[in-house]
Amino acid sequence: MTIISISLTDELLEEIDKLQKGQGFSGRSDVVRAGAKMLIADSKVKERLEGSLNSVLLVIHPQNVEDTVTEIKHEFEDIISTQIHNHLRKDKCLEVFILEGDGARMKELVRMLQTCGKMDFVKLIVA
C-alpha cells in the first residue's frame, strides 16, 4: 500500500470525521478510499456513455456561482431539454437538468461541471 498526502479544507475534514464516526469506518483513510472507489466506479459508467440517451443531471452549487453554471449550460443547449432551478438554504442552489441526446455530450457537460471547482455536487443518472 502507498501512503500519500492530501490537502483538505477544515470543513471537508470535519465532514470526513463525521462520516467515519457515523458510518463506522475505522479511520479517515477508509473514508477517503471509499470515496475514491465510488468516484472511480462513477467515472467508469460515464466512460461508456454513447449514443442517444435520456438522463437527469443534479447539480448543487453556491448561489454566487450561478454565472458559471449559466456559461456552461449555454454550451449544451442541444442536449438540455428542461432545467429546474431552486434556491436551497444557506445560499445554495439546486439545478435539475433533463437531458436528451448524445451520451458523449452528456459526459462532457458533467466533466465541465465537475472540474470547474465550483460545484458542491454533480450527479448524472442515466435512464
Image (spheres, helix red, strand yellow):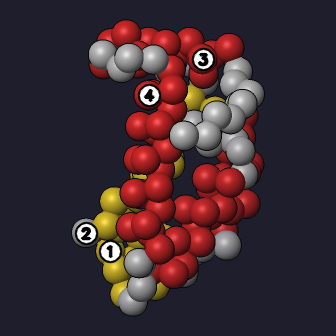
Residue at 64 percent across and 34 percent down: it is: 3
Distance Cα–Cα, label 3 vs label 1: 36 Å
**Most foreground residue, 78 or 21:** 21
Distance Cα–Cα, label 3 vs label 4: 13 Å
Can residue 60 be seen here? The reply is: no
Residue at 69 percent across and 42 percent down: it is: 118
Residue 109 pos. (x, y %): 58, 67
> Quadrant of the rendered structure where residue 108 is?
bottom right
Distance Cα–Cα, label 3 vs label 2: 34 Å
Residue that numbered label 4 is attached to: 30
Residue that numbered label 2 is attached to: 127
Q: SS for tag 4?
A: helix
* Disc on res. 33: none
Foreground tag (3 vs 1): 3
* Disc on res. 54: 1
Foreground tag (4 vs 1): 4
